[in-house]
Amino acid sequence: MENLEITKKQIDENIIQIFVPMKIRKRGGAAMMIVPEGQTVQKKSFDEKLINAFAKAYQWKTIIEDEENEINSLADLARSENISTPHVTKIYRLNFISPKIVEAVVNGTAPRDLRLIDILAKKAPEIWQEQEEMWGFK
């Protein structure tokens, strides 16, 4: 290993330098990151249906909790959205999914095999840790 000596003059307290071994190449007009052999890069996987469903669940929760709004139940919400009450109920239940799972879905780091249909297919456990174990987060 090289002996890396840094003098006091080279250190700036406001700057952090990080060395990442990679090359940047242009391919077809787009910049691509080339990592050294033996290194792996985890690709992010965004599930738009799942992200949109979480967003819709949150939006509906906000509507129902708004005291100035005339919509006070999931049935009222279903009528106003012109969709079935059972569908609204399934999507609304996404508000009770573990924040760790929601964050992973939004950040694109959730397990690739986690799909909206899997979450809606059965009632999620109430305990977040059990949800995380059920869908491969532990």
Image (spheres, grey):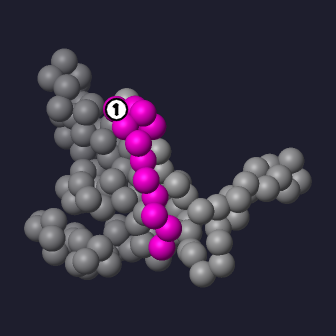
**Vertical placement of residue 88 versus 128, above or below:** above
Q: Position of residue 18 (x, y in %)?
A: 47, 50
Q: Residue furthest right?
A: 28
Front in this rendered view, residue 39 or 67: 39
Q: To which residue does mark 1 refer?
A: 13
What residue is at 33 percent from the left and 53 percent from the top? 103
Front in this rendered view, residue 56 or 14: 14
Q: Quadrant of residue 75?
A: top left
Taking the image as drawn, is residue 120 in sight? Answer: yes
Q: Position of residue 13 (x, y in %)?
A: 34, 32
Say if the magenta span includes residue 9. yes
What residue is at 64 percent from the left and 67 percent from the top? 35
What residue is at 79 percent from the left and 56 percent from the top? 25
What secondary structure predominates along the stretch shown in magenta? loop
Say if the magenta span includes residue 43. no
Disc 1, SS: loop
Taking the image as drawn, is residue 83 in sight? Answer: no
**Vertical placement of residue 8 versus 31, above or below:** above
Q: Position of residue 78 (x, y in %)?
A: 34, 43
**Vertical placement of residue 81 versus 52, above or below:** above
Amino acid type indicated by mark 1: Glu
Residue stretch in magenta: 1-13
Front in this rendered view, residue 83 or 115: 115
Classify mark 1: residues with Cα within 10 Å, few (<14), some (14-19) or many (20+): few
Asked whether, in this view, residue 23 is left or right of residue 38, the answer is: right
Q: Position of residue 85 (x, y in %)?
A: 31, 52
**Vertical placement of residue 38 versus 24, above or below:** below
